[in-house]
Amino acid sequence: MTDPTLTEDAPRPPRILVAEDDDAMRAMLVQTLRRAGYVVVEVEDGFELGDYLAMMRGQGGTLAPLDLIISDVRMPGRTGLEALERLRDQGVSCPVLLLSAFADAETHAEARRLGARRLLDKPVDLDVLKAAVHEAVAH
């Protein structure tokens, strides 16, 4: 028997990918976003981020598209800025929020140039993060 409250027309929760190489930070971000009702996919470095993006539908893969990507700027394999540049080069318009403990003016300028919604400084205020996520997925 199917649940009559579940229909194909029912909105699905937004899918967010979190790319963060610090295990404790990633766990905190994932837990915060899941508690807020989002579906969260997590990857632990730039290598996995690149692999996931390559396997997304629309890029020739089978993984469901994302509604938002949250990525650390500095990670092994591929930085958040490199991933954002690759996405834009491929025509993917998914919003991106970047996080950094070491963001200088040049990093902020590069993030804006590449079309990041925001670059949030670590340690990230969770209320600021949730507001930025809400704003990004609402557009």
Image (spheres, rainbow, N blue to C red):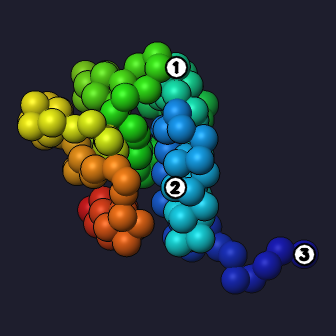
Q: Position of residue 135 (x, y in %)?
A: 29, 66
Residue drawn at point x = 37 percent, y = 54 percent: 123
Give the mark, 2 or 3, whose residue is nearer the N terminus.
3
Q: Provide the residue designation for mark 2.
A: 29
Q: Residues within 10 Å of mark 3 (few under 14, many from 20)?
A: few
User: Is residue 12 in view?
Assistant: no
Residue situated in front as seen by the camera: 62 or 18? 18
Q: Amino acid at mark 2?
A: Leu
Looking at the figure, which quarter contains the N terminus? bottom right
Rendered view: 23 above or below 84: below
Q: Provide the residue designation for mark 1.
A: 47
Q: Position of residue 72 (x, y in %)?
A: 39, 38
Residue drawn at point x = 37 percent, y = 72 percent: 127
Label 1 and label 2: CA atoms lie apart by: 19 Å
Label 1 and label 3: CA atoms lie apart by: 42 Å
The nearer-to-camera label among 2 and 3 is 2
